[in-house]
Image (spheres, rainbow, N blue to C red):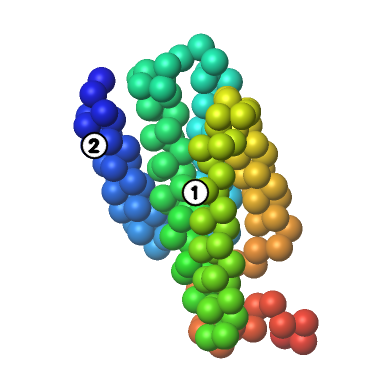
Amino acid sequence: MSPIQITVILNAANVVGALAGTFLLGFFGRKTLMLSSQLVCIVGLLGMFIFSPVVYESSSLQIALTVIFLFGFQTGPGPIVWLYISEICNDQATSVDTVVNWTWTLIISVTVLPLNNSLHNYTWLLFCLTNILGFIYVVIFMEEAMGLSKEQAKSLYYKNAS
């Protein structure tokens, strides 16, 4: 498969995942969609770790596992983080959360190549474990905001909220 074909497949997965996430948000709560999509991301990353020693980067299996991860990310953690932050935070907290989110995005972008060069396929295991920690965090701390009024959503994490 040519690099252009691979790029088209991966970009199509991003678009389809984003459209699916938009559609699914109307039927499932933010927490439910976040948890299920995190599991899809974990499956994709775990598969990349397990199979990367036996397949080449441009193999169909590796591309399929990447598509699985992208679909999971685009239906959950990708858009829901931004939606959830805007629903539950005041303007100042939204600004801080945005800086933190983009800082971690930059850290991942800058470190993925050196990590992959030094850890090889263990990079996928590291990312998989990070997603597992994120899944546990969501289970423990994320409150459902679907169906709440704007005021109720903004007060989800106040200790005195009733």
Q: Nearer the viewer, mark 2 or mark 1?
A: 1
Residue 34 seen: no
- Residue 105 versus residue 115: which sits nearer the camera? 115
How packed mark 1 is, by other alpha carbons closer than 10 Å (few <14, some 14-19, many 20 or more), is few
- Residue 18 versus residue 63: which sits nearer the camera? 63
Q: Secondary structure at mark 1?
A: helix
Q: Amino acid at mark 2?
A: Val
Q: CA distance from mark 2 to mark 1?
A: 21 Å
- Horizontal side of residue 138 vs 44, given as left or right: right
- Residue 127 versus residue 149: which sits nearer the camera? 127
Residue with the mark numbered 1? 109
How packed mark 2 is, by other alpha carbons closer than 10 Å (few <14, some 14-19, many 20 or more), is few
Q: Quadrant of residue 53?
A: top right
- Horizontal side of residue 141 vs 98, given as left or right: right
User: Which residue is outermost to the right?
Assistant: 159
Q: Amino acid at mark 1?
A: Ser
- Residue 107 versus residue 88: which sits nearer the camera? 107
Residue with the mark numbered 2? 8
For the N terminus, the image quarter is: top left
Q: Earlier in the sequence, mark 2 or mark 1?
A: 2
In percent of width and height, residue 131 lies at 62, 44
In percent of width and height, residue 135 lies at 65, 49
The residue that appears at 44% across and 29% down in the rendered structure is 65
